[in-house]
Image: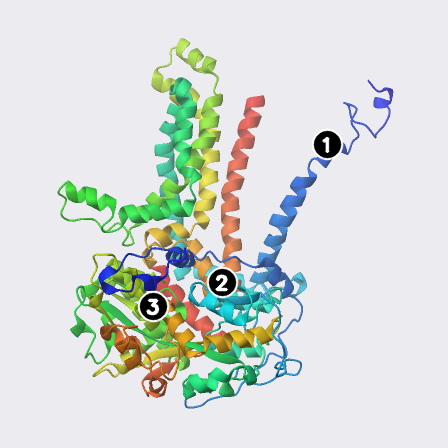
Amino acid sequence: MPTNLASGAEYDTVGHRRWVWPAFAIPGVLWLSLLFLVPFYAIFAVAMGRIDPILLRPVPEWNPFYWDPSVFARVLGDLFGGQVGVVAMRTIGYVFVASALCLLIGYPVAYFVSRKAGKWRWVWLLLILAPFWINYLMRMMSWVNLLSPDGQVNQVLATLGVTALPEWLSGQHFVVILGLVYGYIPFFILPLFAALDRIDDATLEAARDLGASNLETFWRVTWPLSRNGVLGGLVIIMLPMFGDYYTPNLLSGSPRTRMIGNTIDQFINQTTSQGSVGAALTIILMIFVAGLMVYYLYNINRSTQEARR
Amino acid sequence: MAHHPRENWNPARRRRVYTRRDFLQRAAVLGIAVPVIPSILAACGDRGGAGAAELAIGTPSNPVQQPLFEGNEAIESGLEAEDGPLQIYNWADYLSPDIIPVAEETLGVDIEIATFFNEEEALARLSSGEVAYDVWFPTSQRVPVAVAAELIQPLNHDYLPNLETNVWPQLADPYYDQGSRYSVPYVTYTTGIAWRTDMADSADIEGQENPWDVFWNPKYGGQLGLYDSFTDTIALALLRNGVVDPSQATEDELAAAGDALVELVDLVDVRYTIDGAYVGIPEGRFALHHAWSGDLVNSQYYWPEDGDYTVTRYLWPASGDGSTAHGPISSDTMAVPVNATRPVLAHQFMNFMLDESNALENFGWVGYQPPQINLTPDYLVDEEWVAEFLRSALVTPEDFERDSAWVQGPLDAETEALWSEQWTRATSGG
């Protein structure tokens, strides 16, 4: 061991120079500032900037001294009592129902693959993930083909003698929710699989030895131990679902199934003179989903501390 | 791709065309437009918006000349053409892939095409100043905007002999840009109603006093669509409510138009699409759809093999028998961006496109009609470029002068805010 280890502030306890370990954070810090902080600031600058009177486009205001926050009052007014609020509530409804379905469908799948599939588990995992190597849009377009009035689903129904063929793509809430579930469920299964996989068989055997039934073992041991995986999976799928706009576009196209992402897209890409409204709405949506994230981190933190005790 | 729709033009041998064009159009529906962050960054600076020029907005009864600005002059006459490649900035699939090699051969340079999904995106990129295209295809209503923002340069007509000899006089010296100072016409179109006679009753549209009203007919619930384009669709609702000049609509009229569109959600389960007229109608997804005339001419290439394309119809309500309704008419143009690096070549290319046979060849693929003197509706129908039953989708110079024509113009910021408010209502599905 180097002799100067104890003496200097230059070296840490394992003999590395003090800057060595923090230096590993540099790429992360650069990444975050370039790809997160700068764009985030740009959104604020657009939201509180002005509109070019000729091109009808938002002109960002980079100097916070000139920021005009009045747009937030307008957006909050639209959200509470306006049409945008209707879309926001619908979005929250879709995301919660879709997440609940992901939990109901994904949990047994993750449980089976991680704990019951034995040596075939990697094959199962691969089979679950394989379709998701295909681009999200392509998969949604396949649904459009499957569900179109003369699509394969209705062809099968027709062969089975169903006469009143459903119009799947005619602005049905459940079809959009189905699209969301299908699109995001692997991102729920994966973290959950990892969490379930980590559970030591010994803990389950201990529960059984102490007289717990199958159900009790699940409820009092497996479920609490997998809770963080469930929460993690839910956060991972809910955040992008809140911003989704192509699923309702493709699977419905009806105003009845608009999500908040569609509204933001419209403000920014179509009625460009309302770009600052779209930016403000983006910020409010971010604050809302950040709330979910904080809840998740709080839970993780608490359970880590409990585990340490 | 390289799938030329005209290959399938023989009505007996029509094949289903599901090509890159289709994919691009769907992609456009999804709004996969790339936000241009550097352009946002570049746009900082002059605060307060002082010095914003007034837009010079013309109508056929009140044409305007676009102003000239110091430092933004047309190129000199008699210059040598620059080296290629010529950079073109256009809508996706708005130039025939067959005409490009011909142009390359004629001009002796390579041609590269970049595309935009909507005009807002194009204006954003051009105003950022970081792209330098040689030819751009703005709609006529954006010409005054592009001039005021100094995005395009004045033209030197010495390089454009075909403009005067070939183009309708009404558009060679157009109301929006008198003397064609900054733009030359590319194509012209009306906006109306497309339907299938096997799915919709023609009597509900033809001969009606207000054909627009058919979109509010509950008989067609679940079978009709409007364009996912707020200017076109708010205008449709205003015209249906009897407003003669949508550009001048009052706040009350706009609110009523918004109400009418909100009503459509439950009344007929309306769908908003971009491809509904030329893909949705042939597929049978729609019995009727809001339609640009050129989309409908083009729709013939999208029919399935066993489909009967002769059921397609189009009506521009401004010219319908017994109709008192007004209808939109407009045109698209070609222009040279102010920072083009090959302006001489750009002029030569525009002159090439104004050539009659090139314009006709291009029309055969694009479906949008060039305003050429000799390419009259009679000629186009007789030569079987357009079927007789779609003659109504063709435009004549006189159509611009009809009292019932609404010539589309740009909106100012306040008006666009009001239109946007109604559009948000209409598309929220509350």
Horizontal side of residue B20 vs B224, given as left or right:
right
Q: Please tell me which residue is depicted at 28% across the width and 45% down the height of the picture.
A: A146
Task: Locate residue B407: give its quadrant.
Answer: bottom left
Which residue in the structure is indicated by mark 2?
B115
How far apart in space, not on screen, are marks 2 and 3 (Cα)?
18 Å
In the picture, the quarter occupied by the N terminus of chain B is: bottom left
Using the image as rendered, state which of residue A50 and residue B323 is in the foreground: B323
How far apart in space, not on screen, are marks 3 and 1 (Cα)?
62 Å
Secondary structure state at the residue bearing disc 1: helix
Secondary structure state at the residue bearing disc 2: strand
Which residue in the structure is indicated by mark 1?
A21
Residue A6 visible in image? no
Could you tell me residue A192's position as x and y percent?
45, 29
Horizontal side of residue A197 vs B236, given as left or right:
right
Could you tell me residue A172's position as x and y percent?
28, 51
Secondary structure state at the residue bearing disc 3: helix
Q: Residues within 10 Å of mark 3 (few under 14, many from 20)?
A: many
Using the image as rendered, state which of residue B164 and residue A182 is in the foreground: B164
Tell me the mark number nearer the camera, choosing from 1 and 2: 2
